[in-house]
Image (cartoon, rainbow, N blue to C red):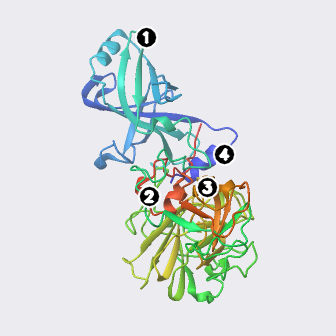
Amino acid sequence: MKTLSTGLATQAASNESSWAELYDFYLHAAIITPFGTVQILRLTTLPGGLSFFTPLTAPEASGTQGNAASYEHWVLGRKLIRGSTKFSSDKLAIAASNVSGEWAQMLADVEWNEVPVLIRKVSMAISNPTANDATPIFSGRVDRAKVTLRQIEFTCSNGLAGFNAMVPRENMHATCRFQWADERCGQLRYAVVNYQTKTCGAASTTSIVKSAGLTEDQGTAGSYGTDLIEALADGAITTSSQQTDYEGFRVKSSYSATDHWRFQFSNEWGDLLQGYWHLNGEGFGLHNGNRKPWIQFDFGSAVQPQVWRIRGRNDLGREVLPRLVQISASMDDGVLNWNPMISYELPPEPGKLFDIHLHNPLSLRYWRIGIRTRWADTLNASAFSKIEAYAARRNWWQNGAIRFLANTPTVALRNVSRTVLASYAGELHVASLPVAPAAGDQFTIERGCGRTFNDCAVRQNYSHFGGFDSMPTEATVR
């Protein structure tokens, strides 16, 4: 998660602002330069040089992080370049002018390979800046250096170089590269829970196949059932913190769409360090139920909610919407006894309820929904305007397929297969069949997968997901 200091955020939004770049090269050995013998080249694009602070993150040594330092002026420029045919701009080129033949020879003698380099952006319009008033824009290593009498050019790369020009947009979880239930997916195709034979019942249509054997789902197409949260007392819904007039219980469905919970303290995200939010010592790990901020539901006794419906606020823009949420549960509200149930990414659509399916969750009393990221670069507060929970499971077979047997009584259906669009208690909604199945027709049904992170999460298969993991949107200063 990333945001900017107040000073940087103000300058980034201003119509006119002056910016300078800081370059820190961490050499393998000390060299003699016109400004002294140094092992770390601290350079700036600002004419006349700049007094600022050393970086607060590696590769700067922990003992010198945030110290006052002098950055010498050097005419520097940078650009993204193509390193291979796979990426449009996966490397960074830094060009610096030479000032003399002696300077060029000195630089040519340096071992530049694998030299760490950190580039930061600072504003010249901030009064009394601190070490936090700088945002990193590149951190990597020098691949090679080309030195001439006129200039030196560094080619640099980092582990996420392919993302520095094109960050994944609203669907952070790109299509999984694995096929459903193959060895890389980790699911067993012919396990009983994933592959079964069923017999059609009466009253099927060309788009709805009914069968008494379809017992994996309990919910119906027209109703979710009874909302478990609606029955809770106000005091049974609590939060890690809350602002006045934004009580946690306002997420109950009996309140209007504009009522919502809102947490009070921005530092619940962790510690702000040089433009990035770092998880603090309280509740390490995204899957930790104690990771703030969270909203908690005390159901009074053990329950097994298999469908959660969540909606962000619909009275403001997407920047206030929760993005990645983690649902956890516990039997005793214990600090160390939270069981992670699912991580789920909510699309940035205000006012819309999204279904989160938990297939076969544990039966526990206390349930928490924790916000892990937001659709914003300023992480001050976030909210849910409505949360509902239901005991009846639905869509167990969604994205799967049915195939009628070769000897099924209805000849027109033999060997016909169709995609399962949705599944409910005793019925499958499928792509149109040539004729309606008759009672006694037999088919096999196989579970499917939408090949997204959320589909993988429903099946508790996080570790095998073969697409991009969640990457929160970053603030960019130009």
Q: Quadrant of residue 315?
A: bottom right
Q: Is residue 306 above or below residue 125?
A: below
Element marked by disc 4: helix
**In the rendered view, does 275 fall on the left or right side of 443?**
left
| CB within 8 Å, label 3 to label 2 | no
For mark 3, what is the residue? 375
C-alpha separation, residue under disc 1 versus residue under disc 2 = 52 Å
Q: Residue 310 location in percent, x, y? A: 63, 69
Which of the two discs, 4 and 2, sits closer to the camera?
A: 2
C-alpha separation, residue under disc 3 versus residue under disc 4 = 18 Å
For mark 4, what is the residue? 13
Element marked by disc 2: helix
Q: Residue 207 location in percent, x, y? A: 72, 61
What crowding class fits label 1: few (fewer than 14 Cα within 10 Å), some (14-19), or many (20 or more)? few
C-alpha separation, residue under disc 4 versus residue under disc 1 = 37 Å
Element marked by disc 1: loop
C-alpha separation, residue under disc 1 versus residue under disc 3 = 46 Å
Q: In which quarter of the image is residue 393?
A: bottom right
Earlier residue among tags 1 and 3: 1
Mark identifier at residue 150:
1
- The kind of residue tagged 1 is Arg
C-alpha separation, residue under disc 4 versus residue under disc 2 = 38 Å
For mark 2, what is the residue? 462
Q: Residue 34 location in percent, x, y? A: 33, 21
Earlier residue among tags 3 and 2: 3
